[in-house]
């Protein structure tokens, strides 16, 4: 009997401990940080801004709810990242937690001046922050992005992720950035966002909105260049998935206008080869396209001749875009695509002998681009409505 | 009547012993030295573990009831069994303390932040004491219950990580050369050699099953699983980054996000790991208690278990943090100490088996 009582006492004691609670922290005491922005400070080196969702205001008795912004955006300046965070903590009535941090925004100026190394180190050493956080570079002030009112999502950090997801293409997170940073074969890149004025001219439209504008290319920890369209359009072909992207190209007869197609499937194959003791690359781009519109007046695209002419024009345009993108990478001495990795896999001894001089070597490497596209679909039609058969016959007669 | 366990339970104990703690603590050091070939280091190091366990089983099978310590005590007196029992118990007590330290550190950093280690240690030790006092059967049954879902998780894991694989994270084979691989293998030996714990379980294994086969399944299976997870770690995080992360094994689960809504599945998986860690503390404590009890012919083990558990708890508090612990794993003297102890125990067992055989021969001819 006594032993049973002892066992019961031990079990009760263990049951109390099994909750795992050591110190009481109520949910109401937590400030859940969703977004973080890093800018160059005006008085100090760094300006850190955090965005936290504000709990819903309580309905006042017999009155309307108090009008408050749904997000608390707070900023402090300091000599370094952790000091700035410390200053924000001194102003926060809730304990800051970063388990749900979604985005980190780094201003272009900060990334160029100080580099992103310190910020990335702080993010990875913090045990609350996960490697699934999305890093962005901001053209202009990063704080402004968090202050902008989103339209289709409740908070700007989730809005930014929504834009990335809806657009598709490249899925790039802190983990990918850190892998690239630790690597000797390729360099970091991050998506770029910017704040634009007056997105729509309606009465209720907010004064500003945020849009995805390009990709930031880094050399080591420092921002080297930001690429916009049309080069940015090529990036998903190399580091993501181009499916769903739209390409517009001039018609075979440029006077007639342009035609557009969406990518149904796309692949890039990088083949390294040795030419005179120097690595060179042959880049083969292949894609299957869905013709979306055409001003080219070629009639039914189910006719192989019409299709071939369009395919050649589109392949030529795609080749030029890829060549321009690669030229930009080489000029800036950046390699987010992983040409270095391909060279390393193909010629390990050659790569080892470079002794971390890949980026210098990359700038000199000859690259040949070959593009081939097939138009396999034209939406749910076989030809655009214009021109009519009669118009086509007239055109032929004129020729 | 001595408790008996089936081959499956026995293999589950050995598999948990060989995989749970190395999964959390070894990847960092192995990737640092061997880079992408960390998976190979585990497999090659596992061969040493397999050899240690098979030699242990072979030596144990030379004695009656597969109980070398008892046989030596009965044949030559308690002093004959003392060296091997003391070395073996000391090694297992050290391993139990280290496992306790690792579980409490990991829990207080990632699962229950802010909870001091000294609060967790008595809870873990309490469960371990209970299981040890109840004997081999509860220990092995818990091991089996933990091991099966763990295998399932590892088999399903690649599907969750598929989109994380990237050509940019793959290196040419042996890109860092053989030196790094050899260094990594040397680090694994201290861990894989812990399969010597088979000594305390082989006497409980049902005589109807093949001891060598089930030992090979348990120890070999652990290292194959570990090697697979190691390969996944380098495929997902590359060959450099895991060498800079404290717990790459944890990050492997934390990175899985099916969508913005389905994520943090590591919280569920880590419960399994925690149970495995708790079991490691228990098994090592069990092994230390078992051999000391047999040596001194103690039937009521409660006090020995409690005293050894308190020693393990105290020792677990000596190392201040995870940095010191991971640093220790890579120290040459530390690994030499472990491997030296393992080999010394094997040597003493082999000598005991040989002397026993000679004596039997002398008695038969006399």
Image: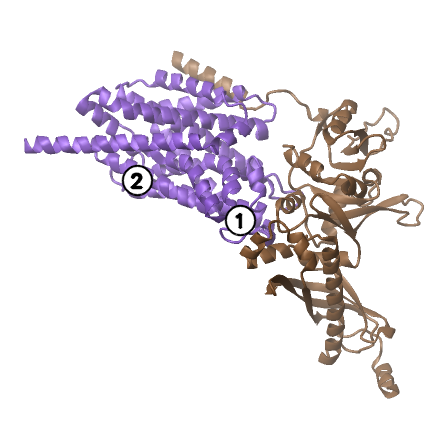
Chain colours: A brown, B purple
Regarding mark 2 in the picture, which secondary structure is present there? helix
Which of the 4 image quarters holds residue A91? top right
Instruction: Tell me the chain of label 1.
Output: B
- The first of marks 2 and 1 along the sequence is 2
> What's the residue at 71%, 70% (across, down)?
A377
Q: Is residue B88 left or right of residue B310?
A: left
Residue B325: percent from left, percent from top = 51, 29
Q: Residue at x 48, y 30 (%)?
A: B328
Looking at the picture, tell me which residue is in the foreground, A92 or A194. Answer: A194
Residue A227 has which mark? none
- Circle on res. B54: 2
Instruction: Verify CB contact (< 8 Å) between mark 2 and mark 1.
Output: no
Give the farthest residue toward the left: B366
Q: Chain of mark 2?
A: B
Q: Is any part of residue A218 visible from this angle?
A: yes
User: In x, y percent, where is residue A272?
Assistant: 61, 62
Residue position for label 1: B158
Same-chain status of marks 2 and 1: yes
Quarter of the image with the C terminus of chain A is bottom right
Mark 1 residue element: helix
Q: Quadrant of the N terminus of chain A?
A: top left
Residue B49 horizontal/vertical position (percent): 37, 39
Foreground residue, B156 or A127? Answer: A127
> How many angstroms separate mark 2 from mark 1 (CA)?
32 Å
Q: Nearer the viewer, mark 2 or mark 1?
A: 2
Please, is residue B2 above or below residue A123 in the view? above
């Amino acid at each position: 009997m006594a032993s049973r009582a002892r066992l019961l006492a031990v079990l009760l004691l263990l049951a109390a401990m099994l909750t795992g609670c050591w110190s009481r922290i109520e949910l109401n005491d937590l400030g859940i940080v969703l977004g973080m922005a890093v800018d160059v400070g005006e008085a100090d080196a760094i300006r850190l801004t955090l965005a936290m969702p504000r709990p819903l205001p309580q309905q006042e008795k017999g009155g309307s709810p108090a009008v408050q912004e749904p997000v608390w955006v707070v900023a402090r300046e300091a000599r370094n990242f952790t000091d700035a965070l410390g200053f924000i903590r001194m102003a926060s009535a809730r304990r800051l937690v970063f388990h749900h941090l979604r985005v980190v925004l780094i201003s272009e100026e900060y990334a160029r001046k100080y580099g992103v190394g310190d910020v990335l180190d702080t993010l990875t050493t913090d045990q609350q922050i996960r490697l699934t956080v999305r890093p962005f570079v901001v053209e202009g002030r990063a704080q402004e992005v968090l202050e902008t009112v989103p339209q289709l999502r409740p908070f700007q950090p989730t809005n930014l992720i929504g834009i990335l997801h809806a657009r598709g293409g490249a899925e790039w997170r802190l983990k990918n950035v850190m892998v690239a940073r630790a690597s000797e074969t390729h360099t970091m890149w991050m998506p770029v966002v910017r704040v634009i004025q007056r997105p729509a001219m309606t009465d209720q439209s907010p004064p500003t909105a945020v849009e995805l504008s390009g990709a930031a290319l880094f050399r080591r920890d420092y921002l080297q260049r930001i690429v916009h369209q049309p080069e940015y359009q090529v990036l998903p072909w190399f580091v993501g998935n181009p499916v769903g992207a739209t390409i517009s190209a001039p018609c075979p007869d440029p006077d007639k206008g342009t035609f557009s197609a969406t990518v149904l499937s796309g692949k890039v194959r990088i083949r390294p080869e040795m030419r005179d003791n120097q690595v060179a690359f042959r880049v083969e781009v292949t894609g299957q396209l869905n013709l979306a519109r055409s001003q080219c007046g070629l009639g039914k695209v189910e006719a192989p001749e019409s299709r071939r002419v369009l395919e050649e024009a589109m392949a030529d345009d795609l080749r030029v875009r890829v060549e321009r993108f690669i030229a930009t990478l080489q000029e800036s001495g950046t390699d987010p695509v992983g040409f270095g990795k391909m060279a390393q896999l193909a010629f390990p001894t050659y790569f080892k002998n470079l002794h971390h001089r890949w980026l210098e070597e990359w700038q000199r490497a000859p690259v040949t681009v070959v593009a081939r596209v097939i138009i396999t679909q034209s939406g749910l039609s076989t030809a655009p409505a214009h021109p009519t058969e009669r118009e086509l016959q007239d055109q032929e007669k004129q020729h | 009547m001595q408790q008996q366990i089936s081959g499956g339970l026995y293999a589950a104990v050995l598999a948990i012993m060989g995989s749970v703690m190395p999964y959390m603590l070894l990847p960092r050091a192995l990737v640092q030295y061997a880079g992408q070939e960390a998976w190979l280091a585990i497999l090659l190091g596992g061969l040493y573990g397999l050899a240690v366990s098979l030699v242990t089983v072979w030596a144990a099978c030379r004695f009656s009831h597969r109980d070398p310590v008892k046989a030596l005590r009965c044949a030559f007196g308690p002093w004959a069994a003392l060296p091997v029992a003391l070395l073996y118990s000391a090694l297992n007590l050290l391993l139990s303390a280290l496992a306790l330290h690792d579980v409490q550190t990991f829990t207080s950093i990632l699962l229950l932040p802010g909870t001091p280690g000294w609060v967790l240690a008595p809870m873990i030790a309490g469960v371990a004491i209970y299981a040890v006092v109840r004997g081999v059967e509860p220990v092995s049954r818990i091991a089996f219950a933990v091991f099966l879902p763990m295998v399932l998780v590892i088999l399903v894991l690649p599907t969750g990580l598929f989109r994380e694989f990237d050509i940019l994270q793959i290196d040419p084979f042996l890109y860092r050369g053989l030196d790094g691989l050899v260094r990594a293998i040397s680090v694994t030996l201290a861990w894989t050699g812990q399969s010597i714990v088979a000594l305390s379980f082989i006497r409980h294994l049902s005589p109807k099953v093949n001891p060598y086969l089930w030992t090979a399944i348990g120890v070999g299976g652990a290292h194959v699983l570990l090697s697979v997870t190691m390969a996944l770690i380098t495929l997902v995080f590359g060959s450099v980054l895991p060498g800079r992360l404290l717990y790459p094994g944890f990050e492997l689960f934390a990175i899985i996000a099916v969508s913005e809504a389905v994520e943090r599945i590591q919280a569920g998986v880590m419960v399994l790991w925690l149970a495995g860690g708790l079991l490691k503390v228990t098994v090592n404590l069990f092994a230390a208690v078992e051999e000391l009890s047999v040596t001194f012919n103690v039937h009521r083990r409660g006090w020995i278990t409690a005293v050894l558990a308190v020693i393990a708890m105290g020792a677990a508090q000596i190392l201040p943090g995870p940095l010191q612990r991971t640093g220790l794993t890579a120290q040459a003297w530390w690994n030499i100490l472990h491997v030296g102890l393992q080999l010394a125990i094997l040597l003493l067992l082999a000598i005991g088996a040989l002397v026993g055989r000679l004596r039997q021969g002398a008695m038969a001819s006399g």
